[in-house]
Image (tube, coloured by chain):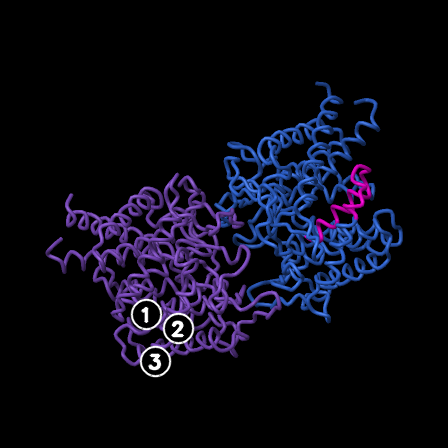
Chain colours: A purple, B blue
Amino acid sequence: MNERERLEKWKDQIGKELDRVMMFWTQHSLDKDYGGFFTCLAQDGTVYDDLKYIWLQGRQVWMYCRLYRKLPRFHQQEILSAAIAGGEFLLAYACPSADSLKCAFVVTRNGQAVKIQRTIFSECFYVMAMDELWRTTHEERYKKAAEKMMDQIVHWVREDPSGLGKAELPGAAPLNAMAVPMMLLNLVDQLCEGDEDMAKKYEEVGKWSVEKIMQHLQRDGKAILENVSDQGQELPGCLGRHQNPGHAIEAGWFLLRHAIAHSDHSLAQTSVEKFMLLPFLSGWDQEYGGLFSFQDVDGHCPTQLEWNMKLWWPHTEALIAFLLAYQKTRDQRLLEHFEKICDYVFRRFSDPEQGEWFGYLNREGNVALTIKGGPFKGCFHVPRCLYMCEEILSQLLATSNKI
Amino acid sequence: MNERERLEKWKDQIGKELDRVMMFWTQHSLDKDYGGFFTCLAQDGTVYDDLKYIWLQGRQVWMYCRLYRKLPRFHQQEILSAAIAGGEFLLAYACPSADSLKCAFVVTRNGQAVKIQRTIFSECFYVMAMDELWRTTHEERYKKAAEKMMDQIVHWVREDPSGLGKAELPGAAPLNAMAVPMMLLNLVDQLCEGDEDMAKKYEEVGKWSVEKIMQHLQRDGKAILENVSDQGQELPGCLGRHQNPGHAIEAGWFLLRHAIAHSDHSLAQTSVEKFMLLPFLSGWDQEYGGLFSFQDVDGHCPTQLEWNMKLWWPHTEALIAFLLAYQKTRDQRLLEHFEKICDYVFRRFSDPEQGEWFGYLNREGNVALTIKGGPFKGCFHVPRCLYMCEEILSQLLATSNKI
């Protein structure tokens, strides 16, 4: 096959996979009584728990709106209604206290708080949901909710974290965990789409986030480390040596989108070479294929029990990263990495029977958990990846006659 | 081999294994500068992190004292000195705040708090350490520290949990998690050894703990569930269906020791049939051998990524349980289960090269993490099991001429 044929083949396969995946969620996840979504779904879609994890509620609202808004075949009333009911569920129940914007991590089916995490991530996915819901419905109250929460998050991260409820302890120095600036950069991308006022408002937050992510490039540019000090220095022990290849690669495509939007050629190059290629080459299991979940930069055995398991989301993020990088550079090596990962995911994660991917394989690539959704896996990484890849492949095929 | 020969063979093998295991810890884990123990040890004993997890500090102090006190070949100044230095480290640094007995979960090498959990377990292992240190050194201040902390724990558990720092949330009803009454029962056993005053003082706590553990026997006596309501009712969802076979079996031997001490024949029978045999028969992997880490009582796939991994501690607890049950009943079936588990652990967990067992195998029984110690594995389950089994085997061989 020539290059055009390869891209056409992937676009066709990925588009069909997106339809199958979304069919699974629309058939099985809707809570018609209380609004919001069931995400604890067995292989065949059976609901095995009705708890509602706020991360996953926010992500599914975002995903539904984005598909409704961007892909004509998902412009369906059913999808819009479910997204709105999910958004209203978040507005009503995400924040357990009337005095604070702190969100729960998980609530009961009818919205009562079960657990609150001392982090910002429930809040971040709330912002994504509200902003995308505004773009889809044009209702201003969603936009306001998104902006208010975003400003609260930025305050917690950059001014005063005390509202998160985390005690300051003498042995735990302030940390730059890559997840935090990554999420902020992703939110800036989300909030600023086609909106000059917002782009201006959050320009500095975006710049700060990029700088904070860059601090994770350590060891003379040879490794991405997940945790560094607040000043960007390497930390001692397991915490400092911890690597998460999928996360680094995800940061890579967040950075690359920022670089493209700001015509920053140097940042684009760093994002591909350092945040995509480095962790992909060191994180790919040469023996069984797939990306390791965690590594130790000095080669010690990680203490996380799942370190050598193959999880769905590092692979979806790598697909987005390498296809976007290929679109930007037309470097054949990047397309080959994309295809290598495609081969792995369609053989290992995709479920020909039921739609939506398996999430958790053992090192050898066999299914270890048969669930399709759970406390950390919902309607997000797989359809986001398939939608973004379909979009990029369409652009590649449309804009380039050379292919 | 006849039965006596089998018991002699196991006693010999287990005694030698205990020596090899303890050699590993005495060679590699002592922090000579700050007191306490390194527990993040690689396969060969290399320290890969110097954080000190309070659970593991307390457990190692307990283990050292117990062996020093009970087995003449461990009656060594080196072991006593290390235990005392560990105890002093705990007295100095376990409680980060002068106003509270709340312990840290993990501290830096020199004792600065890194993380505090909103549970009672650091405190429980502190009690075990202090009580055993008192029994070994006869220094009253250790006994006082143990009793003061024990009374605080009982207050948190039975009167007012607010000092643990956990927010009450409308969706999270008070829970009877089996770990809590189990730990209390284990502490009562520890504190009351040969001490009538303490036995009297904690008799009611022991009784309460047994009742709370019994609430976990559900489904008409057909299953042990890890979490039930505060009133002993089954809970909905994954939380309610969650099973931890190793934990149930460990509860089994805690109950059996209590039953033996109180000449409670009915409790002894329940502990063996319901808390040992039920979870052993349903939790043993018929395909690859070994005990699953987690199960769902209705056969759903657990959401814990490590559900089908084989961890060291369920197997050590099962060895203690079935040997003690055999000692009590002389039921051959129980000895056969003990031997089946022995065969598995010596083939899979034991490391002929370096002493101390591997802790984390994949489902197939191959080593998944090469570490010998980490945030949750220290000098405790393996040597406690080997010491207790050696002691029981000695008693069996000494007291019964019929064997």
As shown in the figure, which amino acid type bears the numbered disc 1? Asp
Residue B199 as seen in the image, left or right of residue A127 = right
Q: Which residue is drawn at 19% across and 50% down?
A: A7
- Left or right: B235, with A297 as reference point: right
Counting residues from the start of the chain, the first of labels 2 and 1 encountered is 1
Q: Is residue B403 above or below residue B72?
A: above
Q: How many marks?
A: 3
- Asked whether A303 or B249 is in front, the reply is A303
What is the chain letter for disc 3?
A
* Tag 2 secondary structure: helix
- How far apart, in angstroms, are the residues tagged by discs 2 and 1? 13 Å
Residue at image coords 40%, 65%: A213
Predominant SS of the magenta segment: helix
Decide whether residue B73 is among the magenta residues: yes
Side (left or right) of A328 relative to A37: left
Q: Splitting the image into 4 quarters, where does residue A249 fall?
A: bottom left
Residue at numbered disc 1: A189
The residue at the far front in this view is A220
Q: Give the mark nearest the N terminus, 3 or 1.
A: 1
Q: What stretch is highlighted in magenta?
A: B57-80
Choose mark 2 or mark 3, whichever is in front. Answer: 2
Work out whether residue A217 or residue A192 is closer to the camera in this orientation and state it: A217
> Which amino acid does the dot numbered 3 rest on?
Lys
* Residue located beneath label 2 in the image: A208
Q: Which structural element holds mark 1?
A: helix
In this view, the residue farthest toward the top is: B1
State which mark lies toward you, 2 or 1.
2
> Residue B176: percent from the left, percent from the top?
65, 56
Residue position marked by numbered label 3 in the rendering = A201
